[in-house]
Amino acid sequence: MSKLQAPRGTRDLYPKDCAWRNFLLDAWRRVSIRNGFEEVDGPIFEHLDLYKVKSGDGIVSELFHFEDRGGRELAIRPEFTPTLARMVAAKANALPRPIKWFCVPNLCRAERPQRGRLREFWQWNADIMGLEGATADAECIFTVVDLMQELGLEPGHVRMKISHRTTVKDILLKLGVAEDKLLSAFDLLDRRDKMEPEAFTQAAAKLGMEPDRVERFEQMCRCKYPCGELDQLREQTGIQNLADLEQLDAQLQAFGIADWCEYDLGIVRGLAYYTGTVFEVHEASGALRAMAGGGRYDQLVELFGGPSMPAVGFGMGDVVLSEVLIDKGLMPDDVSPCPDVFIVAASDTGATQVGPIASKLRWKGIHARYSYKTTRNVGKLLKEAATARSRFALILGDDATNGKAELKNMETGDQQVIALADLEKLVTGA
Amino acid sequence: MSKLQAPRGTRDLYPKDCAWRNFLLDAWRRVSIRNGFEEVDGPIFEHLDLYKVKSGDGIVSELFHFEDRGGRELAIRPEFTPTLARMVAAKANALPRPIKWFCVPNLCRAERPQRGRLREFWQWNADIMGLEGATADAECIFTVVDLMQELGLEPGHVRMKISHRTTVKDILLKLGVAEDKLLSAFDLLDRRDKMEPEAFTQAAAKLGMEPDRVERFEQMCRCKYPCGELDQLREQTGIQNLADLEQLDAQLQAFGIADWCEYDLGIVRGLAYYTGTVFEVHEASGALRAMAGGGRYDQLVELFGGPSMPAVGFGMGDVVLSEVLIDKGLMPDDVSPCPDVFIVAASDTGATQVGPIASKLRWKGIHARYSYKTTRNVGKLLKEAATARSRFALILGDDATNGKAELKNMETGDQQVIALADLEKLVTGA
């Protein structure tokens, strides 16, 4: 290894990168909070067994795991859901319901880094627990859409694709899949984009579907049904009872996000634990991995030793989201904080006042910087203030010891002699 | 292990705990930014070898380390400084100087959890690299003090204790310690509070100090010298050349923080890499571990393969800081975000409008919540709004479908009939 390199699949966040990371985390937090979610967090590592509860032993090879000196098997968190379920289960009786929690953890997966997938990344999670029905599902979907509009995305950029396990199950049963093969069928559906058509048809036949029915099903999955047009879906699939989807559909329209949403029966979500609504957000061209995914998983908390508790939630990573924002020109060029005042010394006498004035401003909450250069060339120093994107520049000359200086508004270019006693007021506009 | 428990020495942050954690992180960020530092971050794990560069092989037992599938030895970060040095070294020529960076990472240490020390914790780091002299040292010290005043602490609560490696070295040489035993002497000094007096005297004798000199030195270390009173220190120690401390002293006074600071030659900081000023913040009674510590370490970047670069910085953990704030009554009871509006339905007709109105408000950036209860008892529902600490409650009755509702200011108790079209304006005060 080189001493100078970050481990494979991880990122060094220099100031500009870190500002972008914070820009996304802040947006996730802001949108979560205004949608009534409360932030939680958990340990960066958990007992290895916790991850086996939901995902079986197969998960271990995807984890960074280790033993502590006491011989405990631990693993860096690859997802937050097991921690969430554990935390809810541990205090299930004390927590007022519904529980609406979000978090913005960093997660690690021991997989091969590739486009859209890194070994360490940040993921927004939000979950509503203890509330049944379409309102909670619609709130989660709304929250994801709210985040996208917050970042400047539009319905033409991204699609919220929604399906429902019950509806797909009804279709599969109708097409000849046996009840005990439904999970295998979901799994097959989830993998179909990565399979050759013949391999898919063969696998489907093994699950009890005749070739013509496979084709019919494929067709249903390729169709997209706009929000508010469930009749089309009913007609195409022949499924009459769409009660759950109908309630969800009404809520999505009431929440004003119908134009972002569509029904897509090809959305399965690999995970076996989903029990109702499932959804994914995709960039409209479909070229990238899903930007977000979620759904209802009513048995999860019970699985972790808690009471039976309905739950719905989603996750959204930072990697694909960033790609989409950059691609659409929606990632601001520089989101680093701008100084309020940049102080420069026009003379040696002025220089003696730089530190004391900067300290006073900072102490009062004002973002103050100054040049560490020894030059007294004000033109050069003002360029440094401009590079730092400061709102004001304060120029300290010989008069500084008499309480006077020049203040330049870096946006308008206005420059005036001021009394240093008025500086705070002038800078904060208070 | 219990499925329900967080691993030993880690914390589950439920909403109130997470809000406190964020309260500290936000304060660290706010103070760093106004003092001109830029935020950076790095991977949660690094190559294990990176940590041996600074601390030798002995560090390994204190780390959570593991191998990835490619056989790379990795470790969860126990501190940020090696990552910082690596990042600076990797781009040393491209980065404008001075480099002023801060970060607020979570760190993990495989040690026995005890009071003030957990296995996972958050630590504020800020560093100034590429700048020699007392100004940078004083800026770091000022930034720590600025954080403390930001959180409501006062000079009577906490002491910024400052020493200087050169001064202590001069004293030790004068007392008979050989040049090649200086590092051992620093190490001994650092451990003296945990030693029996006789053991200390014996160890000091081995380093070349006569018993009466050990006592004299002990006395010097017990004395505290106020900022602005270096003559006392000169008199007591007999060291005439205090040039570095004098410059620092002048800066601390110019920055207006003399009353927070004192010179304490007993402050050593265990780490061998400090080369000049060292400092620690202690709760005034001295009962707790150091709240923060730092100093100048001019050879660090070079050690990691970068160019020679002067550097000064500090770290402050969240655990002892929280203890002190709680102890002084300075940890706010509840720092969770308050809703702007809490919507309640006084009738079934009103209930149909709750979701649509909440969505509209949220979409516009307003923090809106609503009751999930089916009761139409407005008194009960308003209690829920009060528990959520909402600024306003919006009461939707039959008139809601005609665009009218009642808005209650939860602070003043004022309640008025409003047009729903004016809601956003009324709530934001815009």
Image (cartoon, coloured by chain):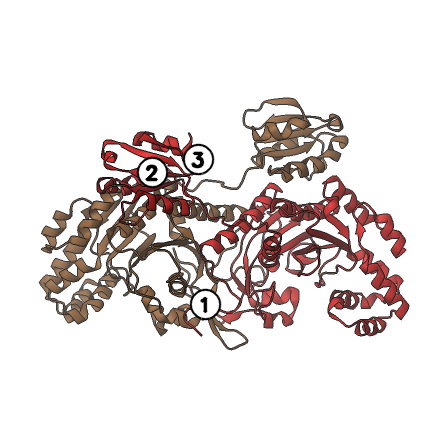
Chain colours: A brown, B red
Residue tagged by mark 2?
B394
Q: Quadrant of residue A327?
A: top left
- Disc number at residue A314? none
Q: Is residue B399 above or below residue A232?
A: above
Question: The residue marked by circle 1 belongs to what chain?
Answer: A
Q: Are marks 2 and 3 in contact (CB under 8 Å)?
A: no
Query: What element does badge 1 sit on?
Result: strand
Residue positioned most to the bottom: A71
Residue tagged by mark 3?
B412
Mark 3 crowd level (few <14, some 14–19, many ≥20, 10 Å Cα): few
Nearer to us of marks 2 and 3 is 3
CA separation, marks 2 and 3?
14 Å
CA separation, marks 2 and 1?
42 Å
Q: Are marks 1 and 3 in contact (CB under 8 Å)?
A: no
Give residue A112's position: percent from left, percent from top. Answer: 41, 64
Q: Are marks 2 and 1 in contact (CB under 8 Å)?
A: no
Which amino acid type is shown beneath numbered disc 3?
A: Thr
Res A325 seen here: yes
Give residue A25's position: percent from left, percent from top. Answer: 45, 49
Residue drawn at x 60%, y 65% is B115
**Lower sequence index among marks 2 and 3:** 2
Q: Quadrant of residue A338?
A: top right
Nearer to us of marks 2 and 1 is 2
Residue tagged by mark 1?
A46
